[in-house]
Image (cartoon, grey):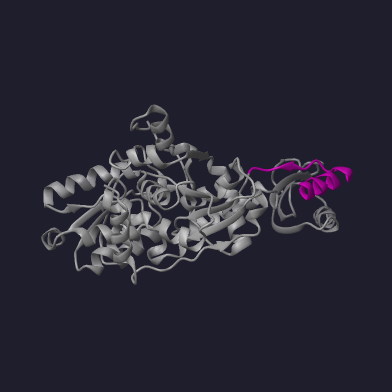
Amino acid sequence: MLTLEKFRQAADVLRGVIFDTALFCSKPFSQTGNNVWFKPENMQLTGAYKIRGALYKVSMLSPEQRKRGLITASAGNHAQGLAYAAQHYGAKATIVMPETTPLVKVNNTKAYGANVVLTGNIYDDAHSHAVKLADENGYEFVHPFNDIDIAAGQGTLAFEILKALPETDVILVPVGGGGLIAGLATLAKELKPDVSVIGVEPSGAACVKMSLRAGKVMSLQKVETIADGVAVRTPGDVVFPYIQRYVDDIITIDDKKLVDVFLDMMESHKMIVENAGLLSVAALKYLNVKGKNVVALLSGGNMDVITISSLVQHGLRNRGRIFTFSVCLPDRPGELHRISGIVARERGNIIKLEHNQFVDINRNSDRGTELRVTLEAFGHEHKNIILTALSQEGYVAQIAASTEL
């Protein structure tokens, strides 16, 4: 059972090992109408909250269980948490991860001394293989979310949140398989019964919301989301009753919203938060309350550089701050100069030019050359001003499909 005594025991185990990720108030995000506070577990040891449950779980295993070796399946953050916990308690760990796991999570897991096995496309594929290896080799399987000890460790976040901000009205929690929100909601309601705990899932992996509506654990036919840390088809049956009892609501978020919020976090707070951790931030705009103290949990920050680059570019394009247009020109001297002059006059900043003189076999044609221009603007309004200026000068500029910078 998840009891207050169990949560206190977990907090004692974690004390002195994990970081104290202090709450901070966000003025930019408080413009949504509430007083917004962030709990930055992206700055936690191993880069995510998952180390809490892993450390407590391994502490509860017997020496014989640890000696047999530990195994788990994880999209990355639980992997690093368990690898660290195993190293901390002198045990060997094998981690099965989806082949799609970002490289930084794979390498960091290996750096904590674990043996990494890559298989399948999503967590559920990795889970099946990990269970098979556990049976074949006698390893102790440590589930990433469907476990009372894991949920108790994750739930210790509620102690810290409510101690730092007793006036907390709402806690927003990213949701994957349910271990985090089950533990956090149970303890939060024990400490402050009137606090509202709201889960946030990606719309392409909303297994908990579907299960709550059905009144029983349900499985999605497929999972499709950029939030790899919560890409789960089926919530945990062990923790689901706690979710049913203590979670007030579930909000679902489209992936596109995560791209925009990633840019907001980088520009407003200079923080890298992985897509799963951004769910709670994206949900701030969908709360039906105003003037409340809202704590959004930033659950992790383990993101590879390639993904960061892609999110930045997509985010800038979504906002019209980077765009590409193509225009056909006659092949004669001075045309490129005219185009760049118009862009400069309207304060656009050219990033890249592609000049193709071979789009038409007739080079004397008025449309014998194609110019593709990628530039920086202040947003969609500024973008439209630039396109209008080109049109007024007689150029037919077409917005081109997005390309990499």
- 224 displayed left or right of 96: right
Q: In the depicted view, which residue is nearer to us: 267 or 315? A: 267
Q: Tell me where residue 31 appears, x and y as whole percent.
A: 67, 52
Q: Is residue 95 left or right of residue 205?
A: left
Q: Is residue 275 magenta?
A: no
386 within the magenta span: yes
Location of residue 208 by image quarter: top left
Whole-percent x and y of residue 58? 23, 60
Considering every residue shown, the one lying at the far bottom of the view is 16
- Which quadrant holds the C terminus? bottom right
Instruction: Specify start and end residues of the magenta stretch as a single range.
Output: 381-401
Question: Can the viewer see residue 246 in this picture?
Answer: yes
Q: Position of residue 294 (x, y in %)?
A: 56, 52
Residue positioned 84% across, 54% down in the render: 342
Residue at 64% x, 52% y is 316
Q: Is residue 301 visible?
A: no
Pick the front one: 241 or 222: 241
Question: In the picture provided, is 387 more to the left or to the right than 117?
Answer: right
Nearer to me, 107 or 170? 170
- Quadrant location of residue 401? top right
For image coordinates 33% across by 70% down, the residue present is 17
Number of numbered discs overlaid on the protein picture: 0
* Picture residue at 78% right of the left edge, 47% below the top: 381
Where residue 151 appears, as percent x and y from the top left, is 32, 51
